[in-house]
Amino acid sequence: MTSRYRILTYISALAISLAVIAEPTDSRFLKEAEALYGKQGSDTVRRWKDMLDNAGKTGTNEKLLMVNDFFNQNVAFRSDQEIWGKSDYWATPLQTMGIQQGDCEDFSIAKYVSLLKLGIPDEQLRLVYVKADIGLSKPQAHMVVAYYSTPTSEPFILDNLSTEIRPASQRSDLVPVFSFNSNGLWIGNDSKAKANKPETRLSRWRDVLLRMRAEGLDTL
């Protein structure tokens, strides 16, 4: 099997998994939240579903704002080591809402999935790894969500470090490293410069998608 064929197969599998996330709602996800995390966790999921219902009646800008605000206000930042005892772990949206804690990847994944559920096309969204200047001795690895109104437009950034959704040009504290969605993986902020062997970096993403489906997110 050629490297090109492996990459196309891998990206296709991600696209199928993301398409499943957008299926109609039933109660399985909520039941899973209650069983695993009790009343506090299930209440957060209910508020999330209410937020999605309300956001679904609004325009794109309001959808972005409501999703960004919901997770920034309902989830406390904690490192993976503090939460899971691991140096790097990507939580599902159910886990993040269930314990109301997460790191930057967890915030971003939950926001990204929520925007997909609100009907924003995957080609307008990317999960973006950046180096963030947060006032320490050196920039820190960080993840955000980028929304592109058109393929060539400047993206708007959804970030747990900021309550505001601002254009990328106004986030000089963030330096893009790579970004991805179900269609591919890109280096820096160049939409034409795709990375080699994206399946290596996307393995955690594929794993979290499979865990989402096992938790019932595929039936939402």
Image (cartoon, rainbow, N blue to C red):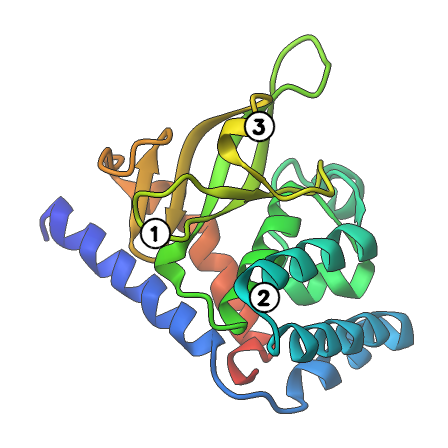
Which residue carries the number 1 mark?
A: 150
* Number of marks: 3
Amino acid on which disc 2 is placed: Ser
Q: Up-down: is 96 above or below 202?
A: below
Q: Quarter-wise, where is residue 27 in the image?
A: bottom right
> Marks 3/2: CA distance?
23 Å
Amino acid on which disc 1 is placed: Thr
Residue nearest the viewer, comparing 170 with 29: 170
Q: Quarter-wise, where is residue 105 in the image?
A: top right
Mark 2: secondary structure: helix
Q: Position of residue 28 (x, y in %)?
A: 65, 87
Q: Where is residue 164 in the image (x, y as percent from the top left)?
A: 69, 42
Mark 3: secondary structure: loop
Which residue carries the number 2 mark?
A: 114
Q: Up-down: is 207 above or below 220?
A: above
Q: Choose mark 3 or mark 2, whichever is in front.
A: 3
Q: Position of residue 47 (x, y in %)?
A: 79, 74
Amino acid on which disc 3 is placed: Arg
Report the side of 12 relative to 95 (left or right).
Answer: left
Mark 1: secondary structure: loop
> Marks 1/2: CA distance?
20 Å
| Picture disc at residue 171 | 3
Q: Residue reaching furthest top?
A: 137
Q: Choose mark 1 or mark 2, whichever is in front.
A: 1
Mark with earlier residue (1, 2): 2
Q: Position of residue 163 (x, y in %)?
A: 74, 43
Q: Residue reaching furthest bottom?
A: 26
What is the crowding at mark 1: few (fewer than 14 residues within 10 Å), some, or many (at least 20)? few
